[in-house]
Structures are given as C-alpha cells and as structure tokens.
Amino acid sequence: MKTDYASLRSQVRNFSDFYGAAITDAKKQISAAMREMSEANKDLLEKYRKEVALRRKYHEQLVELKGNIRVLCRVKPVLKEDQHEEGQSVVVTTDPNNESALSVLKGQGRSHNFELDRVFHPQATQEEVFQEIEPLVTSCIDGYHVCIFAYGQTGSGKTYTMEGSTENPGINQRALKHLFSEIEDRKDMWMYTVTVSSVEIYNEVLRDLLSKDGEKLDIKINPDGTGQLHVPGLRLIEVKSFQHIKKLLAQARRNRITFGTQMNQHSSRSHALLMITVLGTDLASGAKTTGKLNLVDLAGSERVWKSGAEGERLKEAQNINRSLLALGDVIQALRGKEKHIPFRNSRLTYLLQDSLGKGNKTAMVVQVSALERNVGETMCSLKFAERVCKVELGPAARKIQRGGGSHQCD
C-alpha cells in the first residue's frame, strides 16, 4: 500500500507538468492546422475572386455582343440625419468578394438576393461609378448612340450620382470632361463639333432648360426623311470647351423644378435630360460620324401615400409614376422582343426612343436606400433593374457616313 501510495503521489506531483506539456503540444498542433486551413482558405478565396472576375469579364463580352442594357446599382450611404429616425436599421448588404451581388433582408429572417452587372457599396466614390461607364462615353465620340440614366425612389441619390456637387461632380460633368479630353487627344486626326441641349419633362410637358422663358415644346418626326425624332424650337448650343458646358449645366440646374416632399426636402419633380450630339469628321478620309449621348436624371419613383403629396404635388407624383410605368412597359416589350414597342405612351419614353431602340448602348444606374423603412421601394427598384438586365438591344450600330456619301452602320 505504501508503494502504491508513493507511486500515486509521484503521478499527482508530475501531473501538472504532464498536463501543461500536453496542452502546449495540442496548441502547437491546432495552430499548425489553423495555419494550413488559413493558407488553404486564402488560396480558395483568391481562386474564387479570380473566377468571379473572369465570369464578369465573359458576362460583359456577352452583354456587348447581345447589346444588353448594362445595369449598375449604387447603395446610398446612411446619412447622419437618417440615424435619428425610426426604421433606420440597414437591410441592404453587398458582397465584398462579388461586385455583382447584393442582398435585401425583408423581415422574419428572409432575404432576397439580386445579381446585376455591377454593385457599388455605400462608400463607393463618384470616380469609381464613372469609371464603370467611361467606355460608353468614349463610344459616343466614335459615332454610337448612348444613353445613361439614373432610376430609383425619391431621396435615393439619383441627382447626386448624375450631377454631384461643386467639390465632387457626378456622371454628367465627368462624362463631358472626358469627352473634351478625348476630342483634344484626337485633334490631329479628327475634327469634332459638339452641341448641347437640355430639357425637363414636368407633368408630361416638355420644357427647354436652356431658354430664358422655359418655353413648352413638342416632339416631332424629323422632316429630313431619316425617321429620327426632333424637338422644334429646342435650343441647340455649340460648345467649344468644358468650362462653357459647365455654365450651361449650372443654368439648367437652376431652371429645373424641385419641391419638398416627406421623402426628400429638395425632390426633383421632373425628368431632366441632357442631350449631347458629337459630329466628327475624319481629316484623312472625310468620313463623318454622328454620336449622341443622353444623360437622364429621372424623377423619383415613390408611393403617393408615403410621399405625403397633396394637391399640385399629388398631380406631379401621379404623372411621374405614370411615365415611369410607361418606361416599365417599354422595357417589358423590349425584353419580350415584341414587334410594337409603346414608346409613344409618355413624353419620356418617346424622347428616349433613339436611345432605347435597337442598336444603341444604354446603361442604367439604379439607386437604392439601405434603410429598413425604404425596403418596399428598394425591392421595387431592384426587381425593375433585374428586368432591365434581360433587355437585348442587339449589337451597337455605329452611325458613320463614308467619304462617298453612303450612310452605313457597322
């Protein structure tokens, strides 16, 4: 018994040392396994990112071949003034490893995933957004018809994306600056003439934003036999520099109609269209190109009861929603490749016929709020964006007239 007792005492005395050594050895083994797993995960994550990037590249090539409307989504960051109101929890999340995906939490733990051409997280800069559509602006100079428009609920940041601020300009100014930079780079080979016009559609009435009295206008078929649309009486101003065009943009912004609603204190109550035409002449061959760039800031889509609109504001909201519904009908008809496309159902779609028709290049930036209280509008905007993604306009056609005078599209 004494021998057994001594042996047990010895084991107990040595147990702490044995236990400590076992723990240390186990920690080493776990750390080694975690390092191996971490390296394997890094490798898998890198492969996944490359796969996503490659898939996006092939998708973009396919989109280019089919002539799909490119759909970009920008999530508005949560501002300080939003943090003191009810329903301010964030329900829209982006995937840091997949630039095409975002998810919306609809309540009761249910979420809806969306996949678009590109998704910008709330911290994305104006420059990042513009870089995505810069190639479209360049193709306008090459003789293509291009349309870029912002869509989304009131207060989701459409006007900020398109116009920006003095310190941080949006798509409009960046596109025009890039356009004049490209023209300067090509001046030894090409000669260009750039004309600008700007209109708004307010309560289904077309107004010239660059005329002093903002006269009412109408849309007609051009009598020159080309079948193209034109607006008699619309001011077309030739611009020679980016600084000149900046002054015109400021004038158009001042003339645009804005009023406050419960959704946004400075809500744009009209659709604003900035239309740029670029006529190019090849100095060597005499070939001529005609490119058009339409930059469109749509009025905010909103549910009337939520906007608190009454009287004149109610009429505005109803007209806005009616024209956006007409845009949806056009998108649906284009998606279904129907023979009749209802462009004439609203002034907005009629004016955009040149840009949404066959053979043009079009991009839509859908703006969404990340907040819970706007989840209904966010879901509507994203579902519309999904439909737009599937519209095929066919391969883009270049508008070029050879030296011999024949009009061709290639």
Image (cartoon, rainbow, N blue to C red):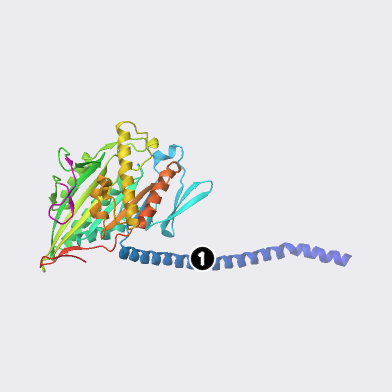
Residue indicated by mark 1: 41
Whether residue 224 appears in magenta in the rendering, the answer is yes
Determine whether, in the image, residue 225 is placed left or right of residue 110. left
From this view, report whether residue 336 is shown above or below residue 246. below
Mark 1 is surrounded, within 10 Å at the Cα level, by few (under 14), some (14 to 19) or many (20 or more) other residues, namely few
Q: Amino acid at mark 1?
A: Asn
> Residue 212's x, y, as percent?
14, 39
| Quarter of the N terminus within the rendering | bottom right
Q: Secondary structure at mark 1?
A: helix
Tell me if I can see residue 238 in this picture.
yes
Can see residue 163? Answer: no
Expressed as whole percent of the image width and height from the top left, the position of residue 93 reads 45, 51
Q: Residue 402: image x %, image y %? A: 13, 67
Q: Residue at x 64, y 65 (%)?
A: 26
Looking at this rendering, what residue extends furthest in the top direction? 311
Q: Residue at x 32, y 64 (%)?
A: 66
The structure residue drawn at horizontal position 33% and vertical position 49%, both measured from the top left corner, is 329
Q: Which residues are magenta?
A: 216-231
Question: How far from the left and from the top, in percent, is residue 98?
Answer: 43, 59
Q: Is residue 343 left or right of residue 191?
A: right
**Magenta stretch prevailing secondary structure:** loop
**How many numbered marks does the figure carry?**
1
Q: Is residue 398 above or below residue 156?
A: below
The answer to if 348 sits in the magenta stretch is no
State which quarter of the image contains the C terminus.
Answer: bottom left
User: Which residue is farthest front?
Assistant: 339
Is residue 341 or residue 230 the one in the foreground? 341
